[in-house]
Image (spheres, rainbow, N blue to C red):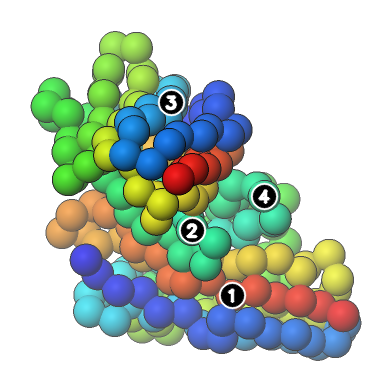
Amino acid sequence: GAVVSQHPSRVICKSGTSVKIECRSLDFQATTMFWYRQFPKQSLMLMATSNEGSKATYEQGVEKDKFLINHASLTLSTLTVTSAHPEDSSFYICSAPDRGTDTQYFGPGTRLTVL
Amino acid sequence: AQTVTQSQPEMSVQEAETVTLSCTYDTSESDYYLFWYKQPPSRQMILVIRQEAYKQQNATENRFSVNFQKAAKSFSLKISDSQLGDAAMYFCANSNSGYALNFGKGTSLLVTP
C-alpha cells in the first residue's frame, strides 16, 4: 500500500510556542490531505482538509488562526499549532487519499505535549 | 450528515476463535466507501479492509471478511482464527470518494490465549 510519513513523531514544547508538523505522501501525489486529532481512548476527529494550491477547509469549532495549514506541494502538507497551550496536547494524525484506490493512508501520528 | 455507530466498546475473543465486530452507518449518498481500520498500541492506523458500496460482493482479506448489508446500512467485520496480534482498537469508517473519513467510536478487541 501507499506510504505516508509524518514528522516529528513526538514533540514537547512550552506554552506559547509554535509547533510545525509535516505530512508527506512518499510514493503518490495527494492534492488533498486530511488532519485529524485524537484524544486518549477516543476516536479520530477531523480538524481540516488541506488542499494543494488553495486554502484549507476547517471543521466547525476548529480555529483556523491557531491551526495553520499549508499544502505546499502535491506531496507535503504542514500543520502549525500556533501559541500552543496545554489543552492543545493531543495526538495529531494526517492522511492522504490514493486516488487510484480511493483509500486513505495514514501517517504514524505526532504526539504533542504542551507544558 | 454521515454517522457511524459501533455499539460494542469492547470485545473479547479467544485465540483461534472467530469474532464479529458490529458497525452501522447512515448516509444519504448513493456512492460511498466503507472501511475497517485497526489501531494497535503504536497508534498507527492500518487499513484492514475496504468495501465499495456499489459492489454487492462482501470484501475479504485473508482472515478478515465483512458482512455488508446495504439496505440495513450494516457493515460488520468478522475475524477468523484470531491471533494475539489482532488485539487492537478497530474503527469502522465511511467516506465519499476523495473525502475525509467519518469514524465510529471504535471497538477495543482483546485476544486471550
Circle 3 marks a residue in which chain?
A: B
The secondary structure type at the circle numbered 3 is: loop
Q: Image height check: is B6 above or below B42?
A: above
What is the distance, in whole Å, between disc 1 and disc 3 at their CAs? 29 Å
| Amino acid type, residue under disc 1 in the picture | Thr
| Amino acid type, residue under disc 3 in the picture | Ser
Circle 2 marks a residue in which chain?
A: B
Q: Residue at x 36, y 74 (%)?
A: A4
Q: Which residue is mark 2?
A: B40
Q: Which residue is mark 1?
A: A110
Q: Which residue is mark 4?
A: A41
**Going by the image, does B51 lie left or right of B91?**
left
- Taking the image as drawn, is residue B38 in sight? no
Q: Residue at x 18, y 45 (%)?
A: B61
**Going by the image, does A6 lie left or right of A61?**
left
Q: Image height check: is A110 above or below B59?
A: below
